[in-house]
Amino acid sequence: MDIVLRIMPMFNCVPNIFSYSILFKGLCNEKRSQEALELIQVMVEHGGSCQPNVVSYSTVIDGLLKEGLVGKAYSLFCEMLQRGISPNAVTCSSIISGMCKAQSMDKSEEVLQQMLDRRILPDVTTYNSLI
């Protein structure tokens, strides 16, 4: 799939956030979340007009969590916050669920508090993870 990003310029096509989002989802579905994470880092370092958004981060965070890479998922969540990208309920619920499964209740509660501080309403998924 990532070959598409390399050949797009040959056809005068510039990848946009939708192109990247599809690639992130595909990589994560194929259990290649580490590659998706590296692609996010390339986008950030490149500093172009196409930067990762909340959907990009949420997709890769969820993929990392599904592969058991909880520490990397949490680090990416923190990076997202540092870059000023506000998480949504999906992002927060995903990271809370992953932290709970890893028995890291302190971080789960920290993310829940960040949700509340940002006025992001927890949903049923969020509460089910905490139970």
Image (cartoon, rainbow, N blue to C red):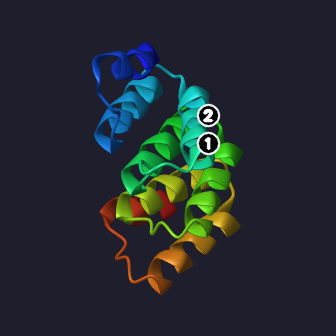
Give the residue number, with chain letter if any, for mark 2.
38
Q: Give the structural element (helix, strand or loop) at label 2.
A: helix
Identity of the amino acid at label 2? Answer: Glu
Q: Residues within 10 Å of mark 2 (few under 14, many from 20)?
A: few
Identity of the amino acid at label 1? Answer: Gln
Q: Is residue 102 left or right of residue 51?
A: right
Specify the quadrant of the image occupied by residue 68: top right
Residue 122 against residue 102 in the figure, above or below:
below
* Depth order, front residue of 94/30: 30
Tell me if I can see residue 27 in this picture: yes
Q: Are marks 2 and 1 in contact (CB under 8 Å)?
A: yes
All told, the count of numbered labels is: 2
Residue 120 against residue 47 in the figure, above or below:
below
**Residue at position x 54%, y 23% from top?**
32
Q: Is residue 118 left or right of residue 73?
A: left
Q: Position of residue 46 (x, y in %)?
A: 58, 44
Q: Give the structural element (helix, strand or loop) at label 1.
A: helix
Question: In the rendered image, which quarter contains the N terminus?
Answer: top left
**Residue at position x 60%, y 72% from top?**
109
Q: Which mark is residue 33?
A: none
Q: Position of residue 40 (x, y in %)?
A: 55, 41
Give the residue number, with chain letter if any, for mark 1.
41
**Residue at position x 50%, y 63% from top?**
130
Residue 107 against residue 29 in the figure, above or below:
below
